[in-house]
Image (cartoon, grey):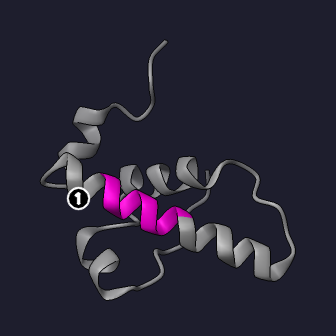
Amino acid sequence: MLLYPAIRDLLDKVPSRYMLVNMVANRARKLSSEAEKEGEPLQDKAVSLAIREVASGALTMESAESGEQPEETEA
């Protein structure tokens, strides 16, 4: 089974696995809580959405550190 996006592709955008895990986990928690507040179910798992945001470049180290919302991207 191949994973998309590949870890090595994600690590090109984030300097370490530790930072990648932290960024994705924090963003996934935010996505989950926002969806719960709005009362709308997520189309995919929150972690998958957060990983896609990193892969597309919408979620960066700078935006994660400042708490900014990544730009919406169409899948």
Give the residue furthest to the left.
15
> How many residues crowd around disc 1 within 10 Å: few (fewer than 14), some, or many (20 or more)?
few
The answer to whether residue 33 is visible is: yes
In the rendered view, does 16 fall on the left or right side of 21? left
Residue that carries the numbered disc 1 in the rendered image = 19
| x and y percentages locating residue 23 in the rendered image | 35, 63
Q: 58 or 37, which lies in front?
A: 37
Instruction: Name which residue lies at 66% across and 49% down.
Output: 45
Is 66 rendered above or below residue 1?
A: below
Is 22 rendered above or below residue 63?
A: above
Q: 5 or 42, which lies in front?
A: 42
| x and y percentages locating residue 36 in the rendered image | 77, 74
Instruction: Name which residue lies at 22% across and 34% down.
Output: 8
Instruction: Name which residue lies at 41% across and 58% down.
Output: 24
Instruction: Name which residue lies at 38% across and 49% down.
Output: 55
Is 10 rendered above or below residue 73?
A: above
| x and y percentages locating residue 13 in the rendered image | 21, 53
Tell how many labels. 1
| x and y percentages locating residue 52 in the rendered image | 48, 50
In the rendered view, does 47 fall on the left or right side of 17? right
The answer to whether residue 13 is visible is: no
Give the residue furthest to the top.
1
Is 61 rendered above or below residue 5?
A: below
Quadrant of the image occupied by residue 34: bottom right
Predominant secondary structure, magenta span: helix
- Which residues fall within the magenta stretch? 21-28
Quadrant of the image occupied by residue 19: bottom left
Magenta highlight on residue 49: no
What amino acid type should be assigned to the residue bearing mark 1? Met
Label 1 residue SS: helix
